[in-house]
Amino acid sequence: MVERKEIEHLGDLVKVELKAPERYIKQVEQILNYFNRLDEVEFDSEKILRREITVNALREDKHEPFVSDDKPLIEKLKKDQNNFIRAPKMV
C-alpha cells in the first residue's frame, strides 16, 4: 500500500507542491497494480513481432537545398549581431 509520506516524497523529487497528497494514493496504487499485471503476462513466442527492412529496401538520402527566387532560404532570414538568425517571438 502506498503511504502519504511516499507521495509527499515523490512531490519533493519532482519539485511539485502537493496540497492534498492523499488524493493521489489511490491513483498511484492503480498504476502500480497495472504494472504488476503487466509483469504477470507470459510471453514465450519465438516469432519476431516486428517487420525487418533490409538496408537495400531503404531509399537513398539526398540533400536538396531549399531555393526560392534564386536565393537560399538562409539568406532571406533576418540576421542579428554575430550572424545569428532572429526567429519570430513566441506568444
Image (tube, grey):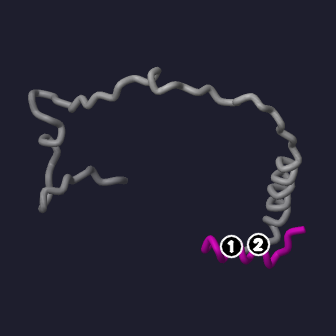
**Is the N terminus in the top left, top right, bottom left or bottom right quadrant?**
bottom right
Q: Amino acid at mark 1?
A: Gly
Q: Is residue 56 above or below residue 16?
A: above
Q: Secondary structure at mark 1?
A: helix
Q: Which mark is residue 72?
A: none
Q: Position of residue 26 (x, y in %)?
A: 85, 61
Quadrant in the picture for residue 29: bottom right
> Is 27 inside the magenta-drawn segment?
no
Q: Which mark is residue 7?
A: 2
Nearer-the-camera pick, 46 or 32 = 46
Quadrant in the picture for residue 23: bottom right
Count neighbours of disc 1 (C-alpha within 10 A) and say few if under 14, some if 14 to 19, many if 20 or more.
Answer: some
Q: Is residue 57 above or below residue 18?
A: above
> Is 17 inside the magenta-drawn segment?
yes
Count neighbours of disc 2 (C-alpha within 10 A) and say few if under 14, some if 14 to 19, many if 20 or more.
Answer: some
The residue located at (86%, 43%) in the rendering is 41
- Give yes or no for contact between labels 2 and 1 (Cβ–Cβ under 8 Å): yes
Q: Position of residue 57 (x, y in %)?
A: 46, 21
Q: Which mark is residue 11?
A: 1
The residue located at (80%, 32%) in the rendering is 45
* C-alpha span from label 2 to label 1: 6 Å
Nearer-the-camera pick, 38 or 30 = 38
Q: Furthest-top residue in view? A: 57
Q: Position of residue 75 (x, y in %)?
A: 12, 42
Nearer-the-camera pick, 45 or 27 = 45
Q: Amino acid at mark 2?
A: Ile
The boundaries of the magenta stretch are 1-18
The residue located at (40%, 23%) in the rendering is 59
Q: Secondary structure at mark 2?
A: helix
Q: Furthest-left residue in view? A: 70
